Amino acid sequence: MRTLLPFLIVSCLVTGCSNQTPQTETAGTHNDTDQAEEEPTTESVEATTETSEQTDAATPLVIDVRTQAEWDESHLEIATHIPLDLISERIGEVAPNKDQKVYLHCRSGGRSGQAKDQLEALGYTSVENVGGLDDARERFESRGD
């Protein structure tokens, strides 16, 4: 057994080293099975994080804090509905990053102002009260988002 263990260790090291991909390979030359077998590198994790942060910045997070009945009557396509009385409990579901830009609106701006105060008290750093539904429509539907 003592002779077999060093042999197995050496065999594993030699076999493991011989299966490495040369570093001269260019991007885009992997096939799908190679990519599925690769473990994520620090660089790929950082790139994924940057991409997700860029997506957060590119897509506005618009939250409608009106009641369900008001939402059902009319709302923005890009908006997420979280009624004012649930905003503190549910904001983490849609905005886990407290530095993400969050736009709030309601019917006239009063409730979205209250929601802004609540989010800032929770540590959110980039919250804007857009005002009422008409203000939000003017701002976000004209952008072509």
Image (cartoon, rainbow, N blue to C red):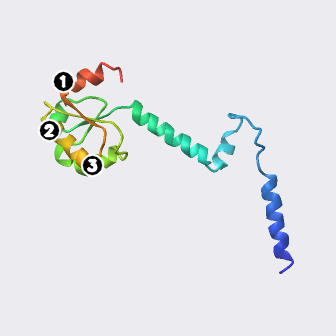
User: Of residues 128 and 80, which is closer to you in this image?
Assistant: 128
Whether residue 67 is visible, yes or no, is no
Q: Which mark, by number, is residue 134?
A: 1
Dot 1 falls on a residue whose secondary structure is: helix
* Residue 77 to residue 83: above or below: above
Residue 22 percent across, percent down from the top left = 78, 43
Taking 87 as reference, is 100 left or right?
right
Amino acid type at circle 1 is Asp
Taking 118 as reference, is 9 left or right?
right
User: Closer to the N terminus: mark 3 or mark 2?
Assistant: 3
User: Closer to the N terminus: mark 2 or mark 1?
Assistant: 2
- Residue under label 2: 111
Label 1: how many residues lie within 10 Å, few (<14), some (14-19) or many (20+)? some
Amino acid type at circle 2 is Arg
Label 3: how many residues lie within 10 Å, few (<14), some (14-19) or many (20+)? few
* Residue 117 to residue 10: above or below: above
Residue 107 percent across, percent down from the top left = 14, 31
- Residue under label 3: 90
Q: Which residue is pictured at 60% across the width and 44% down the height?
A: 43
Q: Nearer the viewer, mark 3 or mark 2?
A: 2
Q: Would you identify the image quadrant in which residue 61 lies?
A: top left
Amino acid type at circle 3 is Arg
Q: Which residue is pictured at 32% across the width and 49% down the height?
A: 92
Label 2: how many residues lie within 10 Å, few (<14), some (14-19) or many (20+)? many
